[in-house]
Amino acid sequence: AEVSTHAAGRIASIGAHVGQRVRAGELLARVESPSIGEAAANYHVHGAERRSAEQQLQRLWGLRDQGLATQRELELAEAAVRTATANQQADRSRLRAYGVGPDHLDGRAPLLAPIGGEVIRSSVVLGSWLQPETEAFVIANLSTLWAEIDVPESDLGRVEVGDAVGIDVPSTGQLDLSGRVAHIHAEVQVATRMGRVRVTVPNPDGRLRAGL
């Protein structure tokens, strides 16, 4: 799972590093973003404007009952309430898009782990600037891995999803690992006449590594 920021900002703190195991929802880093601080401040400003406009509208309704406020004044006050409400709702939507609430006046937003697993890649440096399109962290759940196996075209017809598969990984000294066929690719490689089969391999102790 890739983790990135919703708003450009400076890396204010780092809570996880490559090789560290994390739980879903655990803090990976905090990003200090001017855009988030501005949106949060605007939310509270427009909230104050809305409350003031609502109070003014109530006052005018009272004055109208006494014949001291015109219909035009009431219409303008109602328009002011609608405008302030719309502005605050837009601020809330902007904050929601950034993944934070209106209490983030300091502009700091957390980067949280979307899944439990191991941090296998990180590009963050304390104090550096992070853009939304930049991959900040990559987390992998290595408890189960995929093995892509090439099978001769002549043997593909005998392979079915769910079949047991024995796998050797000489580089780790692990022999005769057990896995099961999870997917059979539809295409056969033209040059080699090999079909590709995906096998899921349990890795409860974490000894197997991605890319082996």
Image: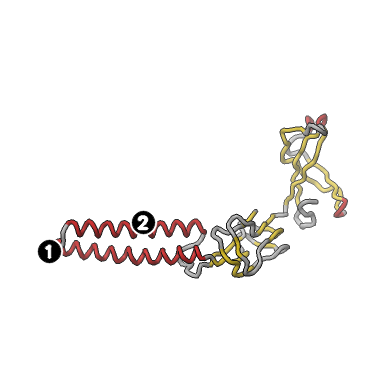
Q: Amino acid at mark 2?
A: Ala
The foreground one among 49 and 25 is 49
Q: Is residue 122 left or right of residue 30?
A: right
The foreground one among 156 and 101 is 101
Q: Write the residue at 63% across / 64% down.
A: 28
The foreground one among 67 and 207 is 67
Q: Nearer the viewer, mark 2 or mark 1?
A: 2
Q: Quadrant of residue 77?
A: bottom left
Residue that carries the numbered disc 1 in the rendered image: 66
Residue that carries the numbered disc 2 in the rendered image: 86
Q: Is residue 180 left or right of residue 24?
A: right
Q: Write the residue at 50% across / 63% down.
A: 35
Q: Position of residue 117 (x, y in %)?
A: 68, 58
Q: Position of residue 169 (x, y in %)?
A: 85, 50
Q: Earlier in the sequence, mark 2 or mark 1?
A: 1
Q: Amino acid at mark 1?
A: Gln
Q: Quadrant of residue 158?
A: top right
Q: Position of residue 131 (x, y in %)?
A: 59, 59
Helix or strand or loop: what does disc 2 sit on? helix
Helix or strand or loop: what does disc 1 sit on? loop
Q: Is residue 161 left or right of residue 31?
A: right
